[in-house]
Image: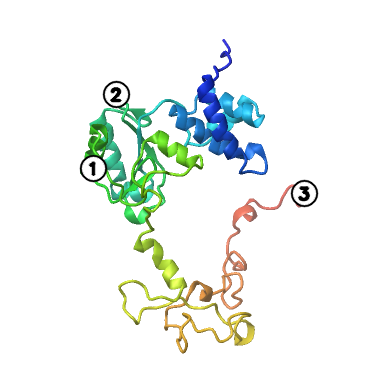
Amino acid sequence: MPALPAPDYPADVRARLEADAKEVIARYPGPRSALLPLLHLVQAEDGHVTRTGIRFCAELLDLTTAEVTAVATFYSMYRRKAGGDYQVGVCTNTLCAVMGGDAIFEELQEHLGVGNGETTEDGAVTLEHIECNAACDFAPVVMVNWEFFDNQTPESARQLVDDLRAGRTVEPTRGAPLCTFKETARILAGFPDERPGATAATGSAGPASLIGLRLAKGEAAPGRGAGADHVVSPRAGEGGRPEEGTAGEPPGGHTGEQAPAGHPSSHDAPQETSASDTAHPSPATAPDEGAPPRGNDAAGPTAKEGE
């Protein structure tokens, strides 16, 4: 049987949500551009995107419920069923996995007695594996309501979820203090985090992530001393002249500096290929006269050529 129309929010709840929704919609040149933050808004109300929330978004943006549902089910950041106060995501992408992410996820499944996407009986923790937390230099990484808990082990992750379930305060490695999933959803909808000191809390990428940026700025690589290599400027143009915009530019941005011998940059990679090397052509571009035919040549002439 087809599902009946979703019920509406109670009048007082709808009035409150409409006021917030109109503030969100006013930020965009077209109303339907506000759909993603509005889905976060209704998720902040219900803990997941309900049929009532979908109806609410559709009515305010003049969309069909099918159009809203298509977006809500496309993005994994929107829950499709009720979950816990704390969404614990374990990165099981390549680097985190080999550094221990798989072991952490298996440990938490067994310890909590839940599978992927499932919630503990007390409604405190929803466990899921996620593909990447964009914090590979801190692997393995666990996120709780999108806040970072870096360099985790099976033991530390188990203690983390135990503290969450017991109501004890836990501090993320970086970023704002932890809040509930509903509170996080409201922040993602575009409303300020009004907790004292929350917006001042911050974090940064780790040293491994920043080495490339430091080299690009001409700074020495961390831990290598004053004589460390710098980024080498692009190769000279045709005829040995510097390319446009690089005349007089030292290799690493330092006056009098020369490119280190045997340390070319990616700009100085050899350009010759087997196809362009006339002295030593590859078989693919100039087959030996006595070599047997390859590929389509081995089949002999086509039917048309043999006529």
Instruction: From the top left corner, tell me how far across and down residue 278 is, in percent.
Output: 61, 76
Q: Between tags 1 and 2, which lies in front?
A: 2
Residue 51 in sight in this render: no
Q: Between tags 1 and 3, which lies in front?
A: 1
Q: What SS does tag 3 mark?
A: loop
What amino acid does circle 2 point to? Glu
Position of 182 with respect to 270 (left or right) is left
Q: CA distance from mark 1 to mark 2?
A: 21 Å
Task: Please state which of residues 131 and 167 is positioned toward the viewer in this rendering.
Answer: 167
Can you identify the residue that label 2 sits on?
121
Instruction: From the top left corner, tell me how far across and down residue 72 is, in percent.
Output: 54, 32
Instruction: From the top left corner, tell me how far across and down residue 108 is, in percent.
Output: 27, 35
Can you identify the residue that label 3 sits on?
304
Q: What SS does tag 1 mark?
A: helix
Q: What SS does tag 2 mark?
A: loop
Mark carried by residue 154: 1
Task: Please state which of residues 234 and 215 is positioned toward the viewer in this rendering.
Answer: 215
- Disc with the residue nearer the chain's start (1 vs 3): 1
- Disc with the residue nearer the chain's start (1 vs 2): 2
Q: CA distance from mark 1 to mark 3?
A: 68 Å
What amino acid does circle 3 point to? Lys
Residue at figure coordinates x 67%, y 44% from the top left: 29
Residue at figure coordinates x 48%, y 81% from the top left: 253
Q: Which residue is the extreme one toward the right?
A: 307
What amino acid does circle 1 point to? Pro
Query: Which quadrant is home to the N terminus?
Result: top right
Task: Please state which of residues 239 and 149 is positioned toward the viewer in this rendering.
Answer: 149
